[in-house]
Image (cartoon, coloured by chain):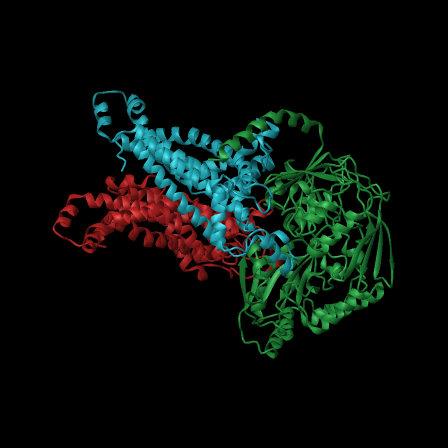
Chain colours: A green, B red, C cyan
């Protein structure tokens, strides 16, 4: 057997280095973070998986980053200007920024990264579909030319999640659409990639060559100071185990704790509770391409009218502190908050729902609801809604599958009528998945088509907001998706940690002092 | 079955009070499953988020879960799933294992091939095989029965094969064979009647381990569809509440232990009653 | 003996071939594919097709099998789609945890199961025997994850005696890291010790019915002497082979315990890989498990022959 000797070799080498490592581990400060599971490859440009972004944010950086009010601020960029009626964007880069391989970041790296992101990046098309050219117009200057203005360009390149992370030119250029190799995890972030031990941890260590911006740290923006020598991201899929692990001191930080433990953990002196300030929201997508719900706006409204969303939120997220039955797609306090159409958000009126269903000539045909148990909240919400819809005479059949199957099935329009997912906080409407006509659900009615174009090509914030009001009103009329409500997830940490970031788990500017 | 043989079957239980208690628990489970709608104080699916996670009290004896559903009613209704999966696995294991084992023992050439196939299947890790099957066929009660049943199909085949070989070697069978008896006559007259008692033993062990297997699958989120009440699902849904609402873990867990334990006790009592020639074919795992 | 060994090795090889085909076919009829999980939520159909082509997943299944089998024969199990590392090293990493966990579990099983089983056999028919066998049966009826959850709650969260979860390699923190495996191995040991206990008891009782034991007894040798000299040695055979198979099963079947305790073992590796459709890893791990099982099977068979000449090998 071939694997025998290799196990042995690993053992011998391991023992040989063990004493060395122990000595080192004692001197170094280590932060142990319990993540919700093993990440996919950390090629953050390609993937929108949160597990990958949480780790990737420490390694890779973007030109801009979102501050605590979710406004983009320069990180790798220094300044920018637009010309030609906002169709040309000129970005001046910060000088002296080093990659983990010791080379300085220049315009060439940004151009190569932008090119790859435009072709293969998960969110690249949102901006780059309209790009006519990307050029280095100086050692530290990049010029992006668009065929039409894009009012959200800065927000679209301000996070690593499926976003424009800056890779070294050679890596970005040769990578294509295949996830980059581990040895190519080279970014400009305050931590650099060390190793990935499957099912054990991903380890990063402080990058000594990091040069922070001058501004004070604020959200993900501003100066980034790495005070831990090393961070280990440890996959701990069971939430109960994550909690007892932090309580017992085996982890310093644990993500995504279930809502029902919130009250008791808030009182527990062995942990501190860190609630996020950016809510996620559950989404029920309607099939706009095929099946009983296609163009059937009346039946969709009947479904929405039957629901009491707060019941689902209470079951899925627990105490009232952690959720908000909010009909506006964007939470109150953001510039995009809108009350348009929101009165239809959660009517809980089975009688009216029955009437609407009758008007839509609904005769009890089963409506197939595709949901996965990999996310407990999805399943909880679906269970509550199925029950409520049954009370309104609407026959919903849950199809419970695992997440990988759901991802595949939802791409096949003949397989489902409704599917359940959630959406993380978006700083701009253009980042909402359901405004993307090729995203499963395929909402592409003529009305949204013209409003979407208007939203992209307008640059004036006030004009964009009024376009958004019209879109939200249309969302409640055509019901391409139903928003469940805002949920504030929370993490727990050792009480020793100071400076935790409410934008999400990042560990620069976090210390034990 | 004559009254005489009923007494014969009950004998091991009378001698062993704990096995009798086990029989009692099983009987209670069967009754609970049959009369679940009348025994349950509430609709097991009724959702009431306002009273979610209530500890056991006068109106909800076993408390409520995270949907505000009555845990007692769900515990009672889960008996149905337990019996359904248990008997489904037993039926599957016997329906496949008995013909395969008997025929293999009687027809050596076929037997060689079949037992090789059993060897191949046995080399696969049972739980992983089950998980793979469930992902392929998407979770449903039938899938769970099939996934767990395949593991016991192989052990049952082996046991039946061993038993039949012994029976075939018995002189009287040998004698009737030499007198020109057909295989069908041999099977129906000599082999199957003698297999009844050992198979009853095997059935009770398979039933017991099917309970534990189903609970493991439920726990991994790959068992019976989660909207159907089952003890394993109840545990899986509530495992995050181990500190917040321990009763959610306690009652269904106790029911799994109680039924599996009772079945093991019954199987054990039956095995002791078996002809010692057959007993050693079983080993201990069932 | 040798010709038997060769024949046996031959059938093992055939079994392995059949198993490898089953593994491969099995895995590729699973719905869903790794691309979606890899690219996340917003991948476009073009991106998906392009990546599928690059990973060779758009080729005919027979061709994929032959390519894979060819590489396996050269000792190369391929590369994990997710970990971007050779499958062999991914397995080796998980094997450390699984082997240590299984070993520690078997130590508990040997220390608890065998002696108590012997006591029950010697005191056959007494209340002590009934109590011990009944207790064992109860232990075998408790779901391991249920035990595990309570072990974490009591010994990690409340008392703080042992770590709650995870397992940092002993190559990094030294042998003290074995304390991470104490609770999971206890949870796993409970049902397995119970089964070994009952097996020890049963096989000792079987042997004690043999003629030579009766003769020894009749000669007036003291009961414990009979046990030590005649029964124990012969009963050992069945127990040892059960140890072999239990160990093999623990390597792969500890999935639930590994999940509860967040251990980086083989079982969890497979389950995660199934859920993410990391085909090369699933194929590789199952193949290795099957090989290990067949080897143990072979060793047990041959050792029967060596240890007990009465066993007739066909």
Question: Vertically, is A255 above or below C238?
Answer: below
Quick one: quadrant of the N terminus of chain B? bottom left
Q: Residue B192, position in %: x, y?
A: 24, 52
Quick one: quadrant of the C terminus of chain B? top left
Question: Vertically, is A27 above or below A234?
Answer: above
Q: Left of C111 or right of it: where is A139?
A: right
Q: Quadrant of residue B272?
A: top left
Q: Is residue B20 visible?
A: no
Q: What residue do we see at 47% from left, 53% from top? A: C62
Number of callouts: 0
Q: Residue A12, position in %: x, y?
A: 56, 27
Q: Residue B197, position in %: x, y?
A: 27, 48
Q: Is residue A491 visible?
A: yes
Question: Vertically, is A112 above or below A205?
Answer: below
User: In the depicted view, which residue is nearer to us: B63 or B67?
Assistant: B67
User: In the depicted view, which residue is nearer to us: C223 or A469?
Assistant: A469
Q: Residue A358, position in %: x, y?
A: 59, 78
Which residue of the protein is positioned furthest toward the left in this rendering? B179
Q: What residue do we see at 29% from left, 27% from top? A: C231
Q: Left of A54 or right of it: where is C62?
A: left
């Amino acid at each position: 057997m071939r694997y025998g000797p290799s196990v042995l070799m690993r053992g011998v080498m391991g023992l040989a280095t063990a004493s060395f490592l122990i000595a080192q581990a004692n001197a170094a400060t280590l932060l142990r973070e319990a993540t919700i599971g093993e990440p996919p490859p950390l090629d953050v440009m390609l993937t929108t998986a949160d597990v990958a972004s949480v780790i990737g944010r420490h390694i890779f950086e973007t030109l801009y980053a979102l501050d605590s009010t979710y406004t983009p601020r320069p990180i790798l960029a220094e300044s920018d200007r637009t010309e030609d009626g906002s169709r040309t964007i000129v970005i001046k880069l910060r000088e002296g920024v080093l990659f983990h391989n010791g080379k300085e970041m220049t315009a060439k790296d940004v151009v190569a990264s932008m090119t790859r992101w435009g072709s293969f990046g998960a969110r690249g098309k949102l901006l780059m579909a309209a790009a006519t050219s990307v050029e280095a117009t100086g050692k530290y200057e990049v010029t992006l030319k668009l065929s039409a203005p894009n009012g959200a360009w800065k927000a679209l390149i301000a996070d690593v999640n499926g976003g424009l992370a800056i890779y070294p030119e050679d890596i970005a250029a040769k990578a294509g659409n295949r996830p980059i190799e581990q040895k190519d995890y080279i970014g400009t972030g305050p931590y650099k990639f060390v190793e990935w031990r499957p099912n054990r941890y991903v380890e990063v260590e402080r990058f000594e060559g990091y040069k922070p911006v001058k501004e004070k740290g604020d959200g993900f923006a501003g100066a980034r100071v790495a005070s831990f020598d090393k961070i280990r991201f440890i996959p701990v899929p069971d939430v109960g185990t994550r909690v007892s692990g932090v309580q017992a001191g085996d982890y310093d930080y644990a993500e995504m704790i279930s809502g029902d433990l919130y009250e008791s953990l808030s009182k527990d002196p062995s942990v501190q509770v860190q609630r996020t300030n950016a809510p996620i929201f559950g989404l029920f997508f309607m099939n706009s391409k095929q099946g009983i719900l296609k163009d059937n706006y009346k039946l969709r409204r009947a479904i929405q009218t039957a629901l009491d969303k707060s019941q689902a939120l209470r079951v899925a997220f627990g105490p009232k502190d952690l959720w908000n039955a909010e009909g506006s797609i964007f939470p109150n306090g953001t510039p995009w908050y809108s009350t348009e159409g929101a009165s239809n958000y959660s009517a809980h009126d089975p009688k009216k729902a029955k009437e609407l269903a009758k008007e839509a000539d609904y005769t009890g045909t089963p409506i197939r609801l595709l949901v996965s148990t990999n996310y407990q909240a999805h399943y909880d919400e679906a269970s509550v809604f199925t029950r409520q819809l049954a009370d309104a005479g609407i026959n919903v059949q849950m199809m419970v599958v695992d997440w990988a199957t759901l991802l595949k099935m939802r791409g096949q329009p003949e397989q489902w009528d409704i599917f359940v997912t959630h959406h993380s906080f978006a700083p701009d409407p253009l980042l909402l998945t359901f405004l993307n006509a090729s995203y499963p659900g395929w909402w592409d009615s003529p009305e949204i088509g013209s409003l979407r174009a208007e939203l992209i090509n307008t640059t004036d914030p006030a004009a964009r907001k009024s376009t958004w009001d019209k879109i939200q009103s249309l969302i409640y009329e055509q019901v391409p998706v139903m928003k469940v409500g805002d949920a504030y997830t929370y993490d727990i940490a050792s009480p020793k940690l100071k400076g935790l970031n409410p934008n999400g788990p990042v560990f620069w500017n976090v210390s034990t002092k | 079955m004559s009254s005489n043989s009923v007494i014969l079957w009950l004998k091991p239980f009378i001698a062993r009070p704990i096995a009798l208690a086990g029989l009692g628990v099983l009987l209670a489970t069967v009754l609970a499953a049959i009369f679940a709608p009348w025994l349950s104080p509430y609709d097991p699916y009724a959702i009431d988020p306002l009273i979610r996670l209530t500890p056991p009290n006068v109106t909800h004896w076993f408390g409520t879960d995270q949907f505000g559903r009555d845990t007692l009613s769900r515990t009672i209704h889960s008996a149905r799933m337990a019996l359904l999966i248990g008997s489904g696995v037993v039926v599957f294991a016997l329906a496949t294992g008995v013909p395969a084992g008997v025929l293999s023992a009687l027809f050596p050439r076929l037997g060689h091939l079949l037992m090789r196939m059993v060897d191949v299947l046995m080399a696969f890790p049972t739980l992983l095989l089950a998980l793979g099957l469930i992902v392929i066929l998407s979770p449903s009660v039938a899938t769970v029965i099939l996934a767990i049943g395949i593991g016991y199909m192989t052990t049952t085949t082996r046991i039946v094969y061993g038993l039949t070989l012994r029976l075939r070697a018995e002189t009287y069978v040998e004698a009737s064979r030499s007198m020109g008896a057909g295989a069908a006559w041999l099977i129906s007259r000599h082999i199957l009647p003698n297999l009844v008692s050992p198979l009853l033993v095997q059935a009770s062990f398979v039933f017991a381990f099917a309970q534990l297997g189903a609970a493991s699958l439920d726990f991994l989120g790959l068992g019976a569809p989660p909207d159907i009440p089952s003890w394993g699902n109840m545990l899986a849904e509530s495992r995050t509440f181990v500190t917040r609402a321990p009763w959610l873990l306690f009652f269904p867990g106790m029911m799994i232990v109680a039924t599996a334990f009772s079945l093991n006790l019954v199987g054990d009592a039956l095995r002791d009653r078996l002809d010692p020639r057959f007993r050693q074919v079983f080993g201990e795992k069932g | 003996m040798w010709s038997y060994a060769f024949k046996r090795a031959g059938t093992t090889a055939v079994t392995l071939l059949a198993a490898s085909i089953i593994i491969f076919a099995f895995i590729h009829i699973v719905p869903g594919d790794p691309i979606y999980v890899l690219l996340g939520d917003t991948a476009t159909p073009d991106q998906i097709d392009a990546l599928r082509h690059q990973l060779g997943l758009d080729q005919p299944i027979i061709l994929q099998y032959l390519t894979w089998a060819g590489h396996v024969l050269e000792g190369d199990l391929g590369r994990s789609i997710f970990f971007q590392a050779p499958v062999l090293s991914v397995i080796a990493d998980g094997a450390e945890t699984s082997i240590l966990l299984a070993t520690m579990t078997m130590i508990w099983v040997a220390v608890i199961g065998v002696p108590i089983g012997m006591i029950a056999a010697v005191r056959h028919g007494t209340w002590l025997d009934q109590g011990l066998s009944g207790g064992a049966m109860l232990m075998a009826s408790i779901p391991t994850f249920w035990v595990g959850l309570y072990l974490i709650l009591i010994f990690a969260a409340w008392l703080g005696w042992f770590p709650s979860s995870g397992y940092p390699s002993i190559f990094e923190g030294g042998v003290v890291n074995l304390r991470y495996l104490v609770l999971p191995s206890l949870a796993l040991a409970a049902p397995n010790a119970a089964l070994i206990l009952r097996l020890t008891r049963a096989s000792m009782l079987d042997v004690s019915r043999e003629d030579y034991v009766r003769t020894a007894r009749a000669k007036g040798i003291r009961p414990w002497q009979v046990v030590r000299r005649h029964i124990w040695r012969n009963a050992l055979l069945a127990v040892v082979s059960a140890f072999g198979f239990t160990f093999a099963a623990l390597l792969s079947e500890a999935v639930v315990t590994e999940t509860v305790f967040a251990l980086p073992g083989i079982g969890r590796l497979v389950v995660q890989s199934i859920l993410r459709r990391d085909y090369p890893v699933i194929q590789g791990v199952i193949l290795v498990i099957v090989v290990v099982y067949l080897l143990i099977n072979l060793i047990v068979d041959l050792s029967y022959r060596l240890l007990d000449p009465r066993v007739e090998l066909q």
